[in-house]
Amino acid sequence: MTIRKIITEKDAGKELRQFLKEELSFSGRFIKMLSEKTGCFLVNGRPVDVSFIVQAGDVFEFIIPEEERSESVQPENIPLNIVFEDEWFIVIDKPAGIPSMTSWLHPTGTIANGILHYYDQKRLPYTVHVVTRLDRNTSGLMVVAKHQYSHSLFSRMQQANQIERRYEAFVHGTLEHEAGTIELPIRRKAKSIIERVVAPDGQEAITHFSLIKQYERFAHVNIRLETGRTHQIRVHFSAIGHPLVGDDLYGGSTEMMKRQALHCSYLAFKHPYTKEPMSFNSPLPEDMKVLLDGNR
């Protein structure tokens, strides 16, 4: 994939390094990484380094390099429900029960393995760059950047809180308020690599919620994340006495559902390159629909 730009009078006389930062939102780290590769930057068809001085009318080309893959993640033919795809990213509607990424607990059978197989079928020379990861038993929308440049742009958007994520969940009990904000710091639980806890020395974590409908045994809520800590929604609702239905790790009962009743239903952000506003929706999965239908 190649990105082409015509240098204008506004950028004439600048070092290519400065142009990359100002016009293409390159980070210093990304520029340093690319500087170690040859042939990524061309001006008027000739290779240049980042100290090159550009002039008005120059034709600049950035050739996105092929990427090395980790041997620990191998391609597997895993079906992917692709909601959207272009040269920059993929939006996938993930079913519950499939991990987003490989780990020592789940070295195979993940979305990451399926993406590598998909890339091989498309002959795309990239590796996996998950932007919005979902827990194994959480369903719904997730974003995967196609290449390192796209991933670096998404990372900046995440740091600036420019990716809106909304979830639907079923939580135990009767909510005291129809809307609210949970602002409790979260950190890893001592002697655990999985479980998280609310603690004063944890990282900032902010969860906004509103009630969709109150049922006799649980509440159907809409959730918007302001931060993205591991297990944030699950930990926060457990901390206020309303653990997620099916979430036995954080105090929920598996009587009504065998997995946490949590679904990423909405994503919205500006395209990382074109800046076009984009939004995606995903309906509730069948297991959550069945529980609702049985409690109407």
Image (cartoon, rainbow, N blue to C red):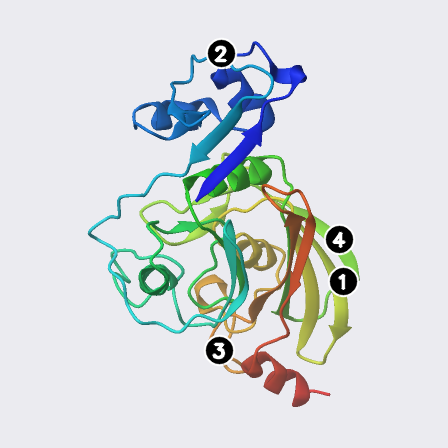
Residue receiving disc 1: 176
Residue at screen point 64% across, 74% down: 283
Residue 125: horizontal and vertical position, in percent?
A: 32, 50
Does the residue at mark 1 contact the one at mark 2 (Cβ under 8 Å)? no
Q: CA distance from mark 1 to mark 2?
A: 62 Å
**Amino acid type assigned to the residue bearing label 4 in the image:** Gly
Work out whether mark 1 precedes mark 3 in sequence or the reverse, and give the earlier one. 1
Which-is-in-front pick, marks 3 and 2? 2
Q: Residue furthest top?
A: 13
Element assignment for label 2? loop
Element assignment for label 1? loop
Residue receiving disc 2: 53
Residue 2: horizontal and vertical position, in percent?
A: 45, 40
**Amino acid type assigned to the residue bearing label 1 in the image:** Glu
Q: Is residue 121 visible?
A: yes
Q: CA distance from mark 3 to mark 4?
A: 26 Å
Q: Is residue 78 left or right of residue 217?
A: left
Which-is-in-front pick, marks 1 and 2? 2
Residue receiving disc 3: 254
Residue receiving disc 4: 180
